[in-house]
Amino acid sequence: MSHYAANPPDADRSSSTSRFLFRLRTRLMPWLFLSPFLLLFAAFYIAPVLYAGYLSVFIKKRVGFGPARDVFGGLANYVRAVQDSEFLLSLWNILKFGLVQVPLMLLIALGLALLMDGVRGRLQGLFRTAFYLPYTIPSVVAGLLWGYLYSKNLSPFNQITGGQTDFLSSGVVLWSIANIVTWTWTGYNLITLYAALQNIPLELYEAARIDGASSWDITRNIKLPLLRPSLLLTLIFSIIGTMQIFAEPFVLRPLGYVPDNITPNTYLYLVASRDGNFSYAATLAILLALFTFMLSMIFLRFTRRGGEV
């Protein structure tokens, strides 16, 4: 009798409901804060990917005497893509580009980051600003700027050297684009690596110096091993960025010989805009994304083989 008087059923139900609401609120609160990002991610990433997948199973086909229209084609676009010599050549172009440009860019960024880490005072801030500044320039503007510098008749490089080098000729244009990308993105990778260097505890340097280590020993045995995660991050981002190159070759097209298949993105853009074949362009975009993912995973497994990151 006294037990029920001390804990009436209504009070027990109220306490149970309060605990349930508290647990529910605790579980839902993180999702509530994440919901703006998730909605935008779904609207601007997931939905376009799903729509591209939907488009990729249609082909343009003329029915009777009417105009060509989209009809269900299954995997016909994918079969066509793997046999498309222009698309395959664009993949080969960007693969050559990445094998040369990405290691060179990261090597320059690493060297500059190590150089900046050894500089103190106002000079360090000056270097940081000067090296990072090209990254703040939009790719289109950078393409226009370098397009002028590459112009055969107006190029200051040719005026200084007295030569007539055509930097936009068929055999050179890919590497001219590589120079623009390196100039633009080295600063971004530099800042990433420099920030990682700043997070290395100073006690490690002091202990190494007490043991008689030289600056080269500190760089080789402390800085470089601890930079491995950041180097891997910049490598993966650089691979993804390389596969997405579009603005630089597109801006240079009116200035010289830039083939349609110079990069995969340039080719699939022309397939969609010039040829009006959005279904096939969506197929190429999906295959390009899969190729980029596969390439990134290969490099990730290869670089992690020597030890965990």
Image: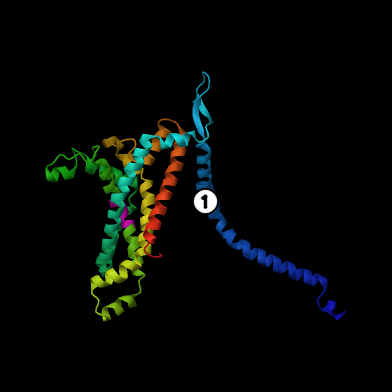
Q: Quadrant of residue 186?
A: bottom left
Q: Residues within 10 Å of mark 1 (few under 14, many from 20)?
A: few
Q: What is the x, y in percent for residue 136? A: 34, 53
Query: Which residue is more in the foreground, 196 or 17?
Result: 196
Measured along the vertical axis of the image, is residue 205 above or below residue 187? below
User: Looking at the image, which residue sits at the far front?
Assistant: 305
Q: What is the x, y in percent for residue 76? A: 48, 33
Q: Quadrant of the C terminus?
A: bottom left
Query: Which residue is more in the foreground, 42 or 174?
Result: 174
Q: What is the x, y in percent for residue 198? A: 34, 69
Q: Quadrant of residue 83?
A: top left
Q: What is the x, y in percent for residue 218? A: 27, 72
Q: Residue at x 38, y 61 (%)?
A: 305
Query: Which residue is more in the foreground, 122 or 247?
Result: 247
The residue labelled by disc 1 is 41
SS type, badge 1: helix
Q: Where are the magenta residues, as a range?
A: 182-188
Q: Residue at x 69, y 65 (%)?
A: 21
Does 187 appear in magenta? yes
Query: Which residue is more in the foreground, 173 or 289?
Result: 289
User: Looking at the image, which residue sits at the far top?
Assistant: 65
Q: Residue at x 47, y 34 (%)?
A: 77
Measured along the vertical axis of the image, is residue 212 above or below residue 250? below
